[in-house]
Amino acid sequence: MRIIVTGAGGFVGRALVRRLTAEHIIVALDRACDSLANIPGATLIEGDLTDEKVIAAAVGEGCDAVIHLATVPGGAAEQDPAAGWRVNIDGTAALVEAVCRARKAPRFFFASSIAVFGDPLPPAVDDDSPLRPRMLYGAHKAMMEQWLATMTRRGALDAASLRLPGILARPRAPSGMKSAFMSDLFHAARVREMFVAPVSPEAMMWLMSRERIVQNLAHALTLGRGAVGEPFALTLPAVRCSFGALVGEVARQAGIGADFVRYAPDVALEAGFGRQPPLTTRHADRLGFTHDGTVEELVAAAFRGIEAEESEKHA
């Protein structure tokens, strides 16, 4: 297939492009493509998603599928609402319009987020839980879920929105994500430095490794047309664990004591990222999407991802 991947130079995008180029024709779109230079076989399109010429260059030869990862994430969207709207709403809508013109009913997989559920969350979340976003980012994702569902009902697309949990472990650099502390924990453990946790040990989270989300996105491409069905959105399975349990397993695998972490909970941050209740994802389970299995496997996969990133930098 000819597949357009947006946000291809990002944390998930790089690993996804690397995986897909072995089997598919990949058009990789991002504002900066330096991190993709050593991946053979991908056509690189560098530029902003809000630029019509950039979208035209990516879509010019048509496509069979789009995996839309590009976004202005939570914290960054709160700090710059105009930029968040421009990319998350206007840019996504422009991309949808362009791919619909290029081909009748192309596949379109949208990286949505658990932020669509908002906070406070109900006692449990399942396929029927309502969307009540509080953050602008979550609202943007919910709005685009509805737009893609509408375009699918109209026959212009075959779209599915996949709601991602927290993904581990992102590079230790400014990401604009309020949840970045989850990944920073791993980097602190590797270099044996003290880490101040902005949530309590009891904070409960839904988590997935980059390795697993790449597998799930690749799996989505194998599903038959229309497999997701109404409402054309899925919450992906995730490992649910306390931050204290995550700290303990990170420390064990890093070979250090768990006392490298000091807790200084931020009430607002914990409300948004540390009160995630039991999660049931029956529809995604039936379709073959999976989580990492255990906290131990999740942490091991996250550490493998960090090591892979460092190997790529020095290649």
Image: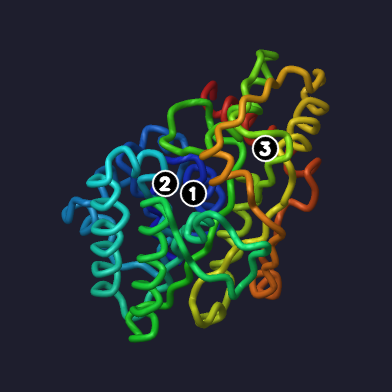
| Structural distance between the alpha carbons of marks 1 and 2 | 7 Å
Does residue 39 appear to the left or right of 72 in the view shown?
Answer: right
Q: Amino acid at mark 3?
A: Ala
Q: Nearer the viewer, residue 301 or 1?
A: 301
Badge 1 element:
helix
Residue 210, how many percent across, how many down? 60, 45
Q: From what the image shows, is residue 81 above or below residue 223?
A: above
Query: Seen from this angle, which residue lies furthest bottom?
Result: 154
Badge 2 element:
loop
Q: From what the image shows, is residue 182 above or below residue 227?
A: above
Q: Nearer the viewer, residue 95 or 180?
A: 180
Q: Amino acid at mark 2?
A: Ala
Q: What is the basis of the colouring in this image?
A: rainbow
For disc 2, the neighbor class at 10 Å (few under 14, some 14 to 19, many from 20) is many
> Which residue lies under the disc numbered 1?
17
Does residue 207 appear to the left or right of 8 in the view shown?
Answer: right
> Which residue lies under the disc numbered 3?
302
| Structural distance between the alpha carbons of marks 3 and 2 | 19 Å
Tell me the residue at 77%/18% (across/down): 259
> Looking at the rendering, in which quadrant would you find the C terminus?
top right
The image quadrant of residue 289 is bottom right
* Residue 8, disc: 2
